[in-house]
Image (cartoon, grey):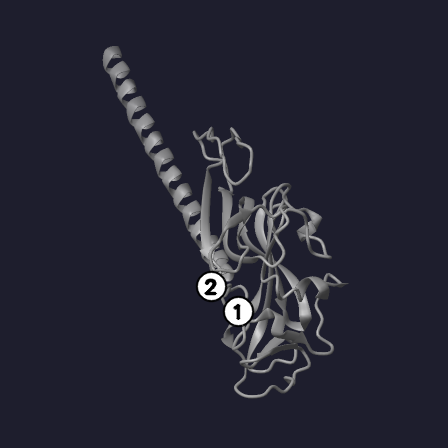
Amino acid sequence: MLVSLAVSSLLLLGVFGAAQSMRQSARAADNLHSLEEKARFALDLLRADIRSAGFWGLNSDAAALRLAAGASVRCAGTDASDWAFRFEEYVAAADAWPLPCSPYRNRRQPGTDVLEIRRAGQATAGVDSRRLQVHTSRREGIVFSAGSPPSLEGETEIRDLVVHAWYVSARSSHDSGEPSLRRKTLVRGGLLRDEEILAGVEDFQVRLALDSNRDGVADRVVDPSASAPSGARVVAVRFWLLLRHDSPETGHVDGRSYTYADRAARSFDDARRRLLVSASEVVANARRS
């Protein structure tokens, strides 16, 4: 009987261990799938924004854009017009905070980059007196907010003005200890609103591909801290996102070394599962600007 009990106990321990291992494997697969879905969501949003940068409607020459009287942008009560209306900087990146207002809760994730996108909306729009809009013809464009578009000759169209600043906050809206990918975005009333795109993003790094001689081909790639040559155009953007799962995973230790962009090798040695993704996107309108 004792021998039978011992054998049964060993068998039960084996079954329990196998079941525990299967549960851990299933959870690992679920966590990785969740990270992959989140990464795909963020990549799609960023790539679409980058691809459309510098698009202004019928006329995508940023130098032909002018401001109507009264057009302004405010961010947390501060005038952000000078920053928002840099139309010729349709794509810009910075490793220091570039806006005149603070990031979410005044806590940007240290060492992360900021990506700025300026463009017109992808769809034409009716006149909205509470929005900043772009009225373009084949020859020029006017950014206005008075509700009545300034007159232009010939064929014209109206689109909403889009201004974004992508960055990583050291906290999210639901957890003060969880970093998040966020975006300052232009909304009604000429205001920049801070919105959370995705919690669990630890890092965001950006590189700009420049066309210095305007032949339509990138001839150098620069870090946001580098000074671009005068007259250079941004023709593509490469970026990296480092995501982590929102909870520790039993039995998992992240012992990987993450090396990307100009980051020194990073290691964490904790129970959070992570996923590093990167993408490159061409600025479709760079050749037209």
In this rendering, the answer to whether 87 lies above or below 274 is below
- From the image, tell me which residue sits under label 1: 55
Q: Is residue 101 left or right of residue 36?
A: right
Is residue 132 something that shows in the picture? Answer: no
Quarter location, residue 133:
bottom right
Cα distance in 3D space between marks 2 and 1: 8 Å
Depth order, front residue of 49/26: 49
Q: Residues within 10 Å of mark 1 (few under 14, many from 20)?
A: many
Q: Quadrant of residue 126?
A: bottom right
Dot 2 falls on a residue whose secondary structure is loop
Please say if 264 is above or below 188. above
- Residue 57 % position (x, y): 53, 75
In terms of depth relative to the viewer, which is nearer, 21 or 91?
A: 91
Q: Is residue 254 left or right of residue 223?
A: left
Q: How far across and how far down the image is residue 163, in percent? A: 61, 64
Relative side of 14 to 75, left or right: left
Could you say where residue 255 lies in the image, as x and y percent from the top left?
A: 47, 28
Q: Which numbered tag is attached to residue 205?
A: none
Residue sitting at x 54%, y 88%:
154
Question: Which quadrant, please, contains the N terminus?
Answer: top left
Q: Are marks 2 and 1 in contact (CB under 8 Å)?
A: yes
> Residue most toward the top?
2
Say which amino acid is labelled 2.
Ala
Q: In terms of sequence position, does the residue under pointer 2 or pointer 1 come before the other?
A: 1
Pick the residue in front: 236 or 258: 236
Q: Please state the total of marks drawn on the protein image.
A: 2
Q: Residue at x 65, y 80 (%)?
A: 129
The extreme right residue here reads 78
Point out the image quarter for the C terminus.
Answer: bottom right
Q: Which residue is mark 2?
A: 284
